[in-house]
Structure formats: C-alpha cells, structure tokens
C-alpha cells in the first residue's frame, strides 16, 4: 500500500513518559515555583505535570525529558497525599474527611469561598498551576459516595 494513504500513529507530547497518562500543561511560572533552576532549564515549552499519584514523574516535556517528584522543592498534592490539597490556604484531605465524618460542609464551603478570592495564588502554589476547587469537590464527593 502506498504510504501516502496510510495514517501514521501520532505520539502526542502530552503523554507522561513514566506512566503514559495524559499530562496537564503548565506555565513556566508554575515550574519555576516548584523546581530548582537547573531542573527548570532542562524542560522545554510546553511542559506538563503528571497528575497521577503513583507515577514518579512530576514534570515532563515533549522530548520525554522528565523531572521526578523527589526534586520538588516541597511536597505537593497529589504526588504526596499528606500535602495540602490546597497549598494556598492549607486545606488538607484530613479537613475534608472531617467534614464528611461530621456530616457538614463547613471547612469545604469556607475553603471554596476563599479559593475564589484574590488571595488565591494557584499559578505558583499548586502543582499544575490551576485552582484546587475541582480537586476538593471530587475528593469530597468521592468520600460522600463511599
């Protein structure tokens, strides 16, 4: 068969070289906030965050260059489950679990209000540079469903 009519398989650059999962594109300011300068310089733009907790890769680029989670300046959720799910305001999974156990939404509701304020600095606080609101809601709903 003529190769002109055969579609070659695509290798998307947003796949983590460590686990094959789809990464989340991140801003350069996010990487610079979490990695030593020498690690930042190794990664090309665009760079991605691997959100899978069991994967050792934290950040990677389209050339399959990786930076392991062990190189992060501080523990970050979801790579470290003990780290705050919201590093801006310190909300932890334990806080969310306490709300569920008590049958209230006190901590979660207060956090969601605060996370939508100008005080939040997600781009440099969270591992993927995005708001933690969706992660908090997913974690809360998963606990309530179980």
Image (spheres, rainbow, N blue to C red):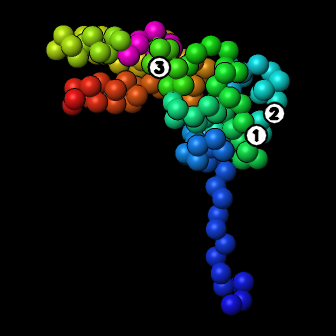
Could you say which quadrant of the image residue 39 lies in? Answer: top right
Question: Circle 1: is it few (<14), some (14-19), or many (20+) Cα within 10 Å?
Answer: some
Kindly identify the residue that appears in the image at 41 percent across and 13 percent down: 92
Answer whether labels 1 and 2 touch (C-beta < 8 Å).
Answer: yes
Element type where label 2 sits in the image: helix
105 on left or right of 126? left
Q: Is residue 21 above or below residue 5?
A: above
Question: Circle 3: is it few (<14), some (14-19), or many (20+) Cα within 10 Å?
Answer: few
1 vs 2, front mark: 1
Q: Is residue 56 visible?
A: yes
Q: Position of residue 115 (x, y in %)?
A: 42, 17
Q: Is residue 113 visible?
A: no
Q: CA distance from mark 2 to mark 3?
A: 27 Å
Q: CA distance from mark 1 to mark 2?
A: 7 Å
Nearest the viewer among 126 and 29 is 126
Nearest the viewer among 90 and 56 is 56
Q: Is residue 89 magenta?
A: yes
Q: Position of residue 25 (x, y in %)?
A: 61, 39
What residue is shown with label 2? 42
Question: Circle 2: is it few (<14), some (14-19), or many (20+) Cα within 10 Å?
Answer: few
Which residues are drawn in magenta? 86-93
Q: Is residue 61 magenta?
A: no
2 vs 3, front mark: 3
Label located before the other in sequence (1 or 2): 2
Q: Is residue 27 above or below residue 64?
A: above
140 on left or right of 47? left
Q: Position of residue 122 (x, y in %)?
A: 54, 21
Residue 81 tag number: 3
Residue 65 tag number: 1
Kindly identify the residue that appears in the image at 64 percent across and 63 percent down: 10
Q: How many marks?
A: 3
């Amino acid at each position: 068969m003529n190769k002109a009519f055969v579609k070659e398989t695509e290798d998307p650059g947003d796949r983590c070289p460590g686990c094959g999962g789809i990464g989340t594109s991140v801003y350069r300011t996010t990487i610079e906030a979490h990695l030593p300068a020498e690690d930042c310089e190794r990664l090309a733009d665009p760079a991605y965050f691997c959100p899978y907790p069991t994967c050792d890769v934290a950040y990677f680029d389209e050339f399959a260059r990786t930076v392991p989670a062990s190189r992060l300046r501080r523990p970050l959720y979801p790579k470290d489950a003990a780290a705050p799910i919201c590093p801006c305001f310190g909300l932890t999974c334990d806080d969310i679990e306490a709300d569920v156990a008590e049958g209230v939404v006190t901590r979660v509701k207060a956090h969601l209000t605060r996370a939508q304020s100008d005080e939040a600095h997600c781009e440099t606080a969270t591992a993927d540079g995005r708001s933690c609101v969706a992660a908090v809601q997913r974690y809360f709903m998963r606990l309530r469903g179980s």
